[in-house]
Amino acid sequence: MKKAVAKKAVAKKAVAKKVAVKKAPAKKATTAKKAPAGTTDPVAETAAPAKEAAAKGTAAVKETAARTTAAVKETAARTTAAVKGAATRKAPAAQEPAAEEPAAGPAAVKKAPAKKTPAKKATTTKKAPTARKAAPAKKTTATTTTPVKKTTATKTTPVKKTTATKTTPVKKTTTGKATTARKTTAVAAAPPAAPEPTPIVAESAPAVAEESVPAVAEESVPAVAEESVPAVAEEPAPAVAEEPVPAVAEEPAPAVAEEPAPAVAEEPAPAVAAEPVPAPAVAADPTPVEAAVPPALTAYDRDRLLTGTHHDPHGLLGAHPAEDGVVFRAFRPYARAVAVLAGEVRADLHDEGDGFFSGVLPLREVPLYRFVVTYEDTVQEAEDAYRFLPTLGELDLHLIGEGRHEDLWTVLGAHPMTHEGVRGTRFSVWAPNARGVRVAGTFNFWDGTGHPMRSLGSSGVWELFVPGIGEGELYKFDIARPDGSHTLRADPMARRTEVPPATSSIVTSSQYEWDDAEWLARRAERPAHQAPLSIYEVHLPSWRPGLTYRQLAEQLPAYVKELGFTHVELMPVAEHPFGGSWGYQVTGFYAPTARLGTPDDFRYLVDRLHQAGIGVLMDWVPAHFPRDAWALAEFDGRPLYEHEDPLRAAHPDWGTLEFDFGRREVRNFLVANAVYWCQEFHIDGLRVDAVASMLYLDYSREPGQWTPNEHGGRENLDAVAFLQEMNATVYRRCPGVVTVAEESTAWDGVTRATHHRGPSGFGGLGFGLKWNMGWMHDSLQYMSHEPVHRKYHHHEMTFSMVYAYSENYVLPISHDEVVHGKGSLVSKMPGDWWQQRANHRAYLGFMWSHPGKQLLFMGQEFAQGAEWSEAHGPDWWLLDPAYGAEADHRGVRDLVRDLNGVYRATPALWEQDTEPAGFQWVAGDASEDNVIAFLRYDADRNPLLAVSNFAAVVRPDYRLGVPDDVPAWHEVLNTDEARYGGGDVTNPHPVKPEPHPWHGLPASIRLTLPPLATVWLRPA
């Protein structure tokens, strides 16, 4: 009889513990207070009534009681903190180390143990990392983990002779989360009268079939003290049938949970970081309860939510504590019904109309929950976007407000992420003038009504974390303007876009793995102005039309490397709606154009260029942006990115809008964008477009169309400050990167350090290099004259040396010079076809030897006759061997290859480009002869002699002064060689100097100068 009673007590105890655990709220387990010294052991206290009710019990129960208290106290301190963190919304259980706190959702028990039923295999959840089969245990109530001898097994690590619980065992408590007590046997008590049942609970115990479990009085459970229960249900479980449970059989059937917690390995598991934390476990057959009706929303709040003008939808939607429980409110337009699932409880919310659903559950704290949304033809179970805390911290918001967030792209825009254990996408946008912002996209059928965003204080930032949204989703922001009207806008921070003319932004994240570490490690070894820099300018969409980024990566690096260029400069790759703008009217400042592929495809192209030893510069356009109604113009209903003064906002030449460089958030948007391209895409340099239009308030404006600055001048002080900040930030954040200014005026200090003030009182702008637009215009003007007239324009070729060292220059023959009726480079030259090609070759030789770096636009390297068109690109057919004049064009291309080869191998041509000591005139005034000659020196004074004859006649025995310390000179390059398509007038043998002073030098040599040609000589 004693044995039967003991078995019955064990069975009752097991059932009571399961009920208590299953009713534990999902949020914030309360830490039990430790018993003071001298208090009575809780297990020992309950042992006596248990023994009395079970016909005086057994001696084993008494012996085990003392050990129980010690194990409970020892374990409680170790795991209570982990239990609290696991039960809270902010730190879900699965984020803790599995060894101490395995994630275990409540299991729904279908049936109580039946007498003499064979044990079944325990089912495991989908997330079970080490699920095992439960074997029958002798005298044991089987559960979902490995059985143990004489033990009521639980959902955690099995131990011998132990009743494991779900949470930390504490004094007067039967529930715990993970830690098991060693060598402890739970003490069962005889069932007294059942307490008064509560009709509605947060999580109901499962219905018990076949055999009813008697109600368990409070004193019968050894740990039900009100102040110490860490995870007991907010309301006690309803009383069950009063019939006693029969004695447990020797081999009872295990309770089979439909979604049991995962079995935990005996060895401690490492912390799980890579896997996203699963959603709160929900019973397969949740217990339906009735939700009370909460107070209705005010008409004002309801209208603001419906019209998308509410600044704090999270304050109304989601779950919120109230006096009589927790209020759940969902805003699901077009839904037929909405129910809330919290653990094993399901409650249908009341339909308030217009897509609002609400209800009150008598809970003390907000649990983890999900919504079940019923539409006309489907039912969806989903997380509630309005139960999450903000994804942006105070530091981010502070930096945004200060205009100092250098990693702005990491906090604004759309970012797939795991937030509070749930996968989704964070949407955030700066729109300080908006009355409200909603996010619309493919995930809500472009109706943002049900996805209003919250305003994060005075920062002007709106944010919303949308669960279940990932990469590839299209989206835009639905912005309520100050006047209440709405505008649908692309994300200014979008990192991927649709292919134009489509304009949506796309959720994306990079998975690319770079392989250019060697290139990045050595690119900062030498400053750009002291290194060889020969640039091939490329318009990617038309270089070879139809190729994607990845296809270009297979062809462009090989071609550029063969020609010997050190860098490519890509015309703007940022997204732009109109292809005819060549990328200079940007709407997607953070997104490579989708015309050629994805952002990772563009990364692949840059990576392949680096692996080929080729640097990558990119045209960057921070001066202005187009007026497209879906982009930046009056983004939130008022001038935001553009200046509020219409005279300063409108660009008179291009019909675009200029950025407001005086607004710190706008300046931050642009500075961070410069860093973004260099950091995220490994760009080696930025060529900044239209700098002159930024520097002057009166640029292309007539009197009365502009307002002077605070000092009465025409300088745009805001733009100056922006350019200085941009350059300083890029050089600090990205070592080895160079910035290049396209600046066409005489502004002082474009390439001077920002902290060095010049004669004008301004610090330098801080660029590394500047395009020498004056050299380009003057030299092309000279070359366009017939040779017989060039003597009257000789100064156009020599004037550049007057200011050559005022800045660090690049000599550009860019796309601007071969479009809009200007003709190609070779077509600018006078004479017949032979003379045009000869002039073309002579000019390139002069350009490569002149102080400064070189830039040549695609197609000019093989003397294309037609000007460039973005529609069809270079005329590659001119290099087809089947074409009759193919040799003429291939000869020019071979010359460019050899120019680059000698240039890179001769430090005198690049090491002292910015130092007067690197240059010396030999013949700068031979206008009658159309001859220009000069010496270039490297840092060790090793010379190179460059001589250009722009006359159409051969000049034999032409005397030129040279240093007397060079025993002989030999020709290293001659643009008139036959292999280049010339007349092959050369100096094939070394030329020895004569002790005959000439041109102010102590010695001289006599050369044969070919017509319309440039010759380079070095010491033999």
Image: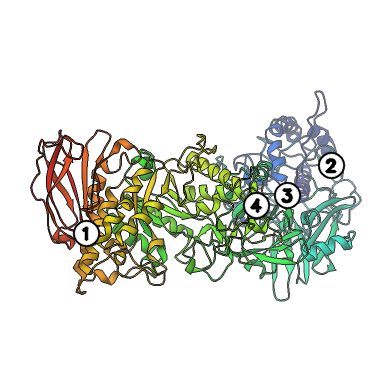
What amino acid is found at the position of numbered circle 3 in the picture?
Leu
Residue 505 vertical placement versus 97 (above, below): below
Q: Earlier in the sequence, mark 3 or mark 1?
A: 3
Rendering coords of residue 569 (x, y %): 39, 55
Name the front one of labels 4 and 3. 4
What amino acid is found at the position of numbered circle 1 in the picture?
Asp
Answer yes or no: is residue 852 visible: no
Which residue is labeled 3 in the image?
A: 456
Residue 16 or residue 792, whichever sits in front: 792
Which residue is labeled 2 in the image?
A: 220
Name the front one of labels 2 and 3. 3
Residue at the far bottom in the pictured view: 377
Which residue is labeled 1 in the image?
A: 894
Check whether the beta carbons of the residues at disc 4 and disc 3 lie within 8 A of each other: no
Image position of 653 (left or right of 151): left
Name the front one of labels 4 and 1. 4
Residue 765 vertical placement versus 894 (above, below): above
